[in-house]
Amino acid sequence: MNARTVDLWAGVGIAAAGLITLFYLIPNYVSAGFGFGLSPRAFPYLCAGAITVLGVFLVLLNLKASRRDQIKAPVARPALRRLLVVLSVLVVTLALMQWAGYLAAAVVCVALLMWMMGERRWLPILLTSVGWSLFLWFLFDRLLGTPLP
């Protein structure tokens, strides 16, 4: 795989994620506000729009063949596979968060990511995943008054 191919597919993925965010996620999951002042959707729309434009720009820059076709990809296939696995874990965590709540999803996510990083001892995995999740829940939910999903 060459650098141009990696950049082309990265641009397609970034542009697709930006379009999904612009036309589905923000309208369905960000409040429209109270009708006065700056809408809570303004900054997410600005960021998602900029990301989408940059993704399209990356695609357009890499559509035409160039001398970058001879440059080897800066990222190896195993690293890309690991990235996709981590992204899948995060998507599963978001789905689990909707179904079981923050604490259960956070514990599972931290435990899975620790296991994927090579930790095989169950006690550090258990203590870290439960302890860190409880700490963040206590900090945000109890001390700061910001409820977590």
Image (cartoon, rainbow, N blue to C red):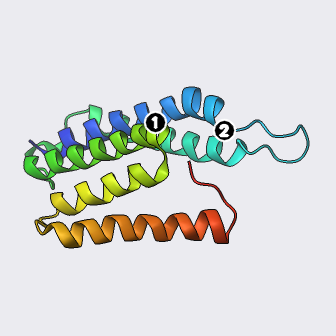
| Residue 117 appears in view | yes
Q: Quadrant of residue 61?
A: top left
Q: Amino acid at mark 1?
A: Trp
**Which residue does the image show at 64% across and 40% down from the upper left?**
45
Foreground residue among 89 and 60? 89
Q: Position of residue 77 (x, y in %)?
A: 9, 46
Residue 58 as seen in the image, left or right of residue 74: right
Please, is residue 19 above or below residue 112 in the view? above
**Which residue does the image show at 36% across and 34% down from the upper left?**
60
Instruction: For label 2, count other residues whose C-alpha is less than 10 Å away and answer few (under 14), some (14-19) or many (20+).
Output: few
| Residue 55 appears in view | no
Residue 81 as seen in the image, left or right of residue 98: left
Instruction: For label 1, count other residues whose C-alpha is less than 10 Å away and answer few (under 14), some (14-19) or many (20+).
Output: few
Q: Secondary structure at mark 2?
A: loop
**Which residue does the image show at 49% across and 29% down from the upper left?**
20
Foreground label between 2 and 1: 1
Q: Position of residue 5 (x, y in %)?
A: 19, 38
**Residue at the disc numbered 1:** 99
